[in-house]
Image: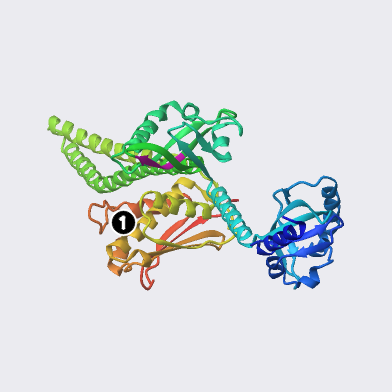
Amino acid sequence: MNSSAVATAFRMLFDAMADGALLADLHGRILLSNPALRSLLGYTDAELAGMTVETLVPAPQRAGHARHRLAYAHHPAPRAMGNGRQLTVLCRDGRELPVDIGLSPLRVDGRDCTLVTLHDATLRWHAETTLQTSEERLRLAKRAAGLGVYDYDLCTGIIHCDEHIRRLWGIGLQEPVTHELLQEGIHPPDRASRQAAWEIALDPAGNGHYATEYRIIGRSDCVMRWVSVIGQMFFEQGRPRRLVGVVRDITEQKAAEQKIQQQRREMESLLKHQVAAQVASAIAHALNQPLVAISAYSESALRLLQDEGGHHPDLLHALRGGVEQSQRAGRALHELLAFLQGGQVESAPIALNACVIEAIAALRYDGYGDFQPVLELQEDLPAVQGSRLQVQKVLDNLLRNGIEAMRDANLPAGAMHIRVRTAVDAGMAHVSVEDSGPGIGAAMARHIFEPFYTTKNGGIGLGLAISRSLIEALGGRLWLETEAEGGGIFHFTLPLAP
């Protein structure tokens, strides 16, 4: 084939290329351009002919491009431009078009030239940008939720863990992660429960769900943490092949749960003590008057017999014994009551708003989650002088009563509102607890703070009596707003801390 035929064949192939292409000399002048390039950039053949390739480069990159072009002229070889960088080319209308660029040295008509191919990378760039955005959102979501991601290939034994999991276990970034290594980090008492959850996930007859909580001890810092592990096992032909899931550090959550449980135990102990005190007080009041009467009658009869000369020694002995025993019983009752009601109340400055928030959290933990708390807490509320445990017990009782009143009225969960307000009034902190139930009638309101008065099935009627005694012991006052329209409103006050 002669040179003319070769040139014709080259031009036909050059013009038929699907990607844009241009032929430039070593000085960067454009000698040829194909139709795909002209369509891509919006130039005509005459406009491109003789133009330097730097004209197609965005202005900030032109100087650098010229240096790279000269370096390429000294060592020409087929290669792609960019080395992973995003490249753009200027269109005739000023738009910057993302492109993939390839370079190939050619000798045409005795001259050294460079064949430049340009592929429109708009779709690829868009896909990469979308993927990067998605990955960044995933990273942000993982960070916000405190999640670590793992992928365990059971066939090869290879486990891929992200940095969060490695940090929890104290595993180096380049250190291989194995099932045995993760097992070693589990607190020994928790390994049996974790193994039980693992065997359930491995069972092909199940759904492959893996869920467990256990403690781990970091290798690097020896700190014990609680983690929640959730995963999904995938099976092939009835055999477990791959487990993918997430790990979450729940140490703070466990600490909060333990704190609530401790508060609940303390309040239950306080409640038992207060119930005993209220019962003893009621019994003392009930028995005190008969005992006083027995003692008085016995003393009167004793004096009459003595005035008559005391001719009945056995009767005198019995009457003296009756006086002594009735007075002894009265002293025993008063001593028991003094013991149950005695003791110094541990009083200290406490944050009342924090007590309200903790009481609501404890209720939700106990399953009272079907109500909507509406909090109107005064900002910068001064500390009050009192007992955190006793104040929380009062709040717990008032909130529970409100929720149960709304439940008994068959209100839907969305309509069950409890409003808690805090304020400072006349040198005292003032708390109001209002429910959206049916309200409290006048007859009930007259007796509501009396011991053993209750309208609940199975109730003993001491909750409000105990609450009032606790508040009064702290120097405050608890009362019911009897003129409230709809719902019940209880108020109590506490002295501000010095």
State the residue at coordinates (26%, 45%): 283
Mark 1: few, some, or many residues within 10 Å (few <14, many ≥20)?
some
**21 and 166: which is toward the camera:** 21
Q: Nearer the viewer, residue 333 or 91?
A: 91
| Left or right position of 210 against 40 | left
Residue at the disc numbered 1: 450
**Of 439 and 143, the residue lying toward us:** 143
378 falls in the magenta region: no
Q: Residue at x 83, y 51 (%)?
A: 68
Instruction: Classify the position of the N terminus by image quarter.
Output: bottom right
The kind of secondary structure element at disc 1 is loop
Vertical position of residue 493 compared to residue 229: above or below:
below
Read off the magenta span: 228-236
Q: Quadrant of residue 110?
A: bottom right
Amino acid found under the numbered disc labelled 1: Glu
| Left or right of residue 73, residue 329 in this image | left
Closest to the observer, 106 or 249: 106
Q: Is residue 189 visible?
A: yes
**Residue for point 39% across, 33% down:** 194
Question: Was residue 235 drawn as part of the magenta stretch in this picture?
Answer: yes
**Image side of residue 253 versus residue 303, left or right:** right
In the rendering, at what x and y percent does residue 22 appear?
75, 61
* Residue name at image x 66 percent, y 61 percent: 17
> Residue 253: x and y, percent?
48, 44
